[in-house]
């Protein structure tokens, strides 16, 4: 590769400046602010704050509500990642085999990706609406008295469905391109060596997709934990009390609804640590990412 | 048993694009058949139809005693070696060799024995635990060969297996493939567009052109009696000279020059005259009457290729590098080595 040498040694920094400004302004500064205020008790009426050390952390770690939200987040993340990944893989494998009308089929799956999470939430809320939602009616037909927004488990169910639906397209795109990057001759060699296409999938196709799959797993965990905020907000209908909420949503609810800025900051510091851990896992993986051939 | 029989085999792709146009071929058990032809003539397509990787539009393919038209590739008991080897990148060399056997329900001890035997035959023993990415091109090629032989198939199918190797390795692998196939006695169908590879490997050559068989025969038959101008031009390097000529009685003329007077019975009028470069020599006496105006010379070391024109027609001769040359030389054409082809049809006329 040809190396470009800058005339002035300031030019690279100037070119980086906009990006650095954004990172500082919208990431580093708020993060620092959050860490600072997690050690303070904020007066609910905004009359100053008191340094309380690790008290905020002690409070949240002894709060059963916090653990309930943490448990829900874990289950929710697992379910969303599992179903979003497996369903999109299934769709991608099928789409890879489609010859006729492939473009239509792919477009139909991919367009969902253009829907933003809060809109997903709105559509989900509509589909699962207690009075007019078609899914609610369907559930009723099967004898399930579904009350999304009222019943904890029903809301959780609707949230998982909407989140999975929203996340399938991006997974689909990655899996499809992953599948198409597997050399055709390798698939053909396998079809000579192994009669069962099911077995072939698990012994050849799936292992060759594993690098893509692992990357997607991290993306999906991040999505389920953090990007579903808008969806949770719409689905819980601003009544987080009896409804399942994720940790990210709880940060918002406690901080801006409950006016407990210190506690909510402590929560976001915990989440920051989670993000940090996830990032390390992903970088580690990308570093030693399996490059076949 | 590895007899392969093709009967009126055709392949039509979407849009009525016919790429294999009715091929009949009978391959005996243990025979080494090479399909050769220019790029795009349908060699790979034909091979892939035998393998079952491509559907057969019409006709029948029989392997052993079974018509395999509707059989899965895995059920045809064939093994294929691909151009880019198509090894399983996530499996070790051992697993690559064992994979097919496992899926065919071969007992464990038998798998172990066969893989070890193949590894020994192909000198792959030191690499059994390695992944393909840690192998050289030649070693990958051997693994691909090994994967084919452990299966003990009815037939080996090769699709240009050597074209990714450097020239030297290609020659040595060529020899190994030939020996291995002889030793195992397994039928082989080998696709290449390299005519040298075709000549050296084949028991019988099948020359394809535009989806049709132009000629089937042993390498020497094809070389010495090409069935058409196409085959004449394709097999042999440097290629056979093809000159428009006129036959009247015994005389064969190119333009105004009489190049020989030994035309066989029954050939008259306009023909295409074929002469191999090595059948053209410098004339002993200066009165042969055929003069070659030299355009340029290629030195090959053992041989010298002299390119020039006779009566404005291109002609190449291969002669010893020691003979002195001037701008124009008198040449003689071996009269018993002439090939006559119909000037329109291109089909062979003599013998
Ligand atoms: N899936 C396909 N759809 C349409 N046409 C195809 C398809 N596959 C191959 N062809 C055409 O069929 C013809 C024969 O292809 P084939 O691959 O058999 O050639 P080949 O003799 O193996 O050539 P090469 O020496 O370059 O490998 C080509 O003209 C090719 O364009
Ligand atoms: Mg080919």
Image (tube, coloured by chain):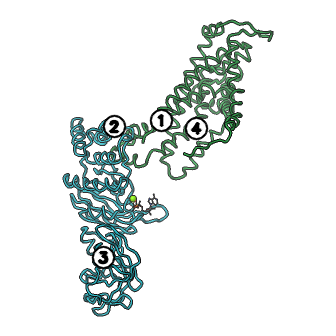
Write down the colour of chain A. green
Residue bearing the label numbered 1: A211
Q: Position of residue B37 (x, y in %)?
A: 36, 66
| Cβ atoms at labels 4 and 1 below 8 Å apart | no
Residue bearing the label numbered 3: B276
Categorize mark 3 by other alpha carbons within 10 Å: few (<14), some (14-19), many (20+).
Answer: many
* Residue B64 visible, this orientation: no
**Cα gap from disc 1 to disc 3, whole angstroms:** 57 Å
Q: Please report the residue visible at 50 percent of the width from the left and 41 percent of the height from the top.
A: A178
**Cα gap from disc 2 to disc 1, whole angstroms:** 19 Å
Categorize mark 2 by other alpha carbons within 10 Å: few (<14), some (14-19), many (20+).
Answer: some
**Cα gap from disc 4 to disc 1, whole angstroms:** 16 Å
Q: Is residue A109 left or right of residue A208?
A: right
Q: Position of residue A253 (x, y in %)?
A: 70, 18
**Cα gap from disc 2 to disc 3, whole angstroms:** 49 Å
Residue A170, numbered circle: 4
| Cβ atoms at labels 1 and 3 below 8 Å apart | no
Q: Please report the residue visible at 28 percent of the width from the left and 56 percent of the height from the top.
A: B174
* Image chain in cyan: B
């Amino acid at each position: 590769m040809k190396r470009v040498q800058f005339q002035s040694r300031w030019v690279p920094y100037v070119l980086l400046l906009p990006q650095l400004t954004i990172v500082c302004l919208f990431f580093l500064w708020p993060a620092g602010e959050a860490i600072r205020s997690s050690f303070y008790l904020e007066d609910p009426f905004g009359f100053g704050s008191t340094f309380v050390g690790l008290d905020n952390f002690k409070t949240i770690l002894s709060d059963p509500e916090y653990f309930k939200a943490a448990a829900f987040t874990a289950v929710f993340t697992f379910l969303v990642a599992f179903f979003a990944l497996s369903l999109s893989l299934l769709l991608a494998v099928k789409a890879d085999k489609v010859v006729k009308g492939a473009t239509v089929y792919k477009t139909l799956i991919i367009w969902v990706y253009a829907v933003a999470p809060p809109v997903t939430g709105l559509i989900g809320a509509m589909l699962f609406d207690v009075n007019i939602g078609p899914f609610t009616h369907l559930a009723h037909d099967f004898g399930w008295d579904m009350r999304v927004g009222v019943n904890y488990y029903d809301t959780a169910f609707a949230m998982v469905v909407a989140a999975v639906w929203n996340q399938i397209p991006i997974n689909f795109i990655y899996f499809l391109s992953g599948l198409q990057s597997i050399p055709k001759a390798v698939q053909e060699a396998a079809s000579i060596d192994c009669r069962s296409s099911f077995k072939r999938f698990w012994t050849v196709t799936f292992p060759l997709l594993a690098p893509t799959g692992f990357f997607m797993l991290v993306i999906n965990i991040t999505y389920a934990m953090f990007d579903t905020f808008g969806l949770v907000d719409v689905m819980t209908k601003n009544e987080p009390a009896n409804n399942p909420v994720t940790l990210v949503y709880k940060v918002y609810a406690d901080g801006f609804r409950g006016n407990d800025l210190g506690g909510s900051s402590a929560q976001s510091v915990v989440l920051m640590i989670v993000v940090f851990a996830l990032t390390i896992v992903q970088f580690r993986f990308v570093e030693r990412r399996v490059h076949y051939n | 048993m590895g007899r392969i029989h093709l009967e009126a085999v055709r392949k039509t792709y979407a849009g009525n694009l016919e790429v294999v146009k009715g091929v009949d071929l009978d391959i005996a058990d243990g025979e080494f058949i090479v399909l050769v032809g220019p790029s795009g003539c349908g060699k790979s397509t034909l091979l892939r139809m035998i393998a079952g990787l491509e559907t057969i539009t019409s006709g029948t393919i029989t392997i052993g005693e079974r018509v395999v038209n509707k059989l899965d590739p895995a059920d045809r008991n064939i093994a294929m070696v691909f151009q880019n080897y198509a090894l399983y990148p996530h499996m070790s060399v051992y697993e690559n060799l064992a994979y097919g056997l496992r899926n065919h329900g071969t007992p464990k001890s038998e798998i172990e024995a066969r893989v070890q035997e193949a590894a020994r035959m192909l000198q792959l023993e030191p690499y059994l635990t390695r992944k393909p990415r840690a192998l050289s091109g030649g070693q990958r090629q051997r693994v691909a060969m090994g994967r084919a032989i452990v299966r003990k198939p009815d037939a080996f199918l090769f699709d240009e297996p050597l074209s990714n190797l450097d020239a030297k390795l290609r020659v040595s692998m060529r020899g190994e493939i030939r020996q291995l196939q002889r030793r195992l006695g397994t039928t082989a169908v080998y696709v290449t567009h390299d005519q040298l590879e075709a000549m050296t490997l084949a028991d019988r050559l099948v020359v394809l052109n535009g989806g049709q068989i132009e000629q089937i025969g042993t390498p020497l038959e094809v070389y010495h009696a090409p069935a058409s101008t196409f085959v004449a031009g394709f097999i042999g390097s440097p290629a056979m000279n093809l000159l428009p000529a006129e036959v009247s009685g015994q005389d064969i003329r190119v333009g105004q020059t009489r190049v020989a007077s030994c035309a066989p019975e029954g050939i008259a009028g306009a023909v295409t005259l074929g002469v191999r470069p090595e059948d053209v020599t410098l004339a002993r006496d200066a009165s042969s009457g055929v003069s070659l105006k030299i355009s340029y010379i290629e030195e090959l070391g053992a041989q010298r290729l002299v390119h020039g024109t006779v009566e404005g027609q291109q002609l190449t001769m291969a002669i010893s590098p020691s003979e002195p040359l001037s701008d124009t030389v008198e040449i003689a054409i071996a009269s018993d080595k002439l090939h006559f082809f119909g000037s329109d049809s291109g089909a062979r006329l003599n013998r």
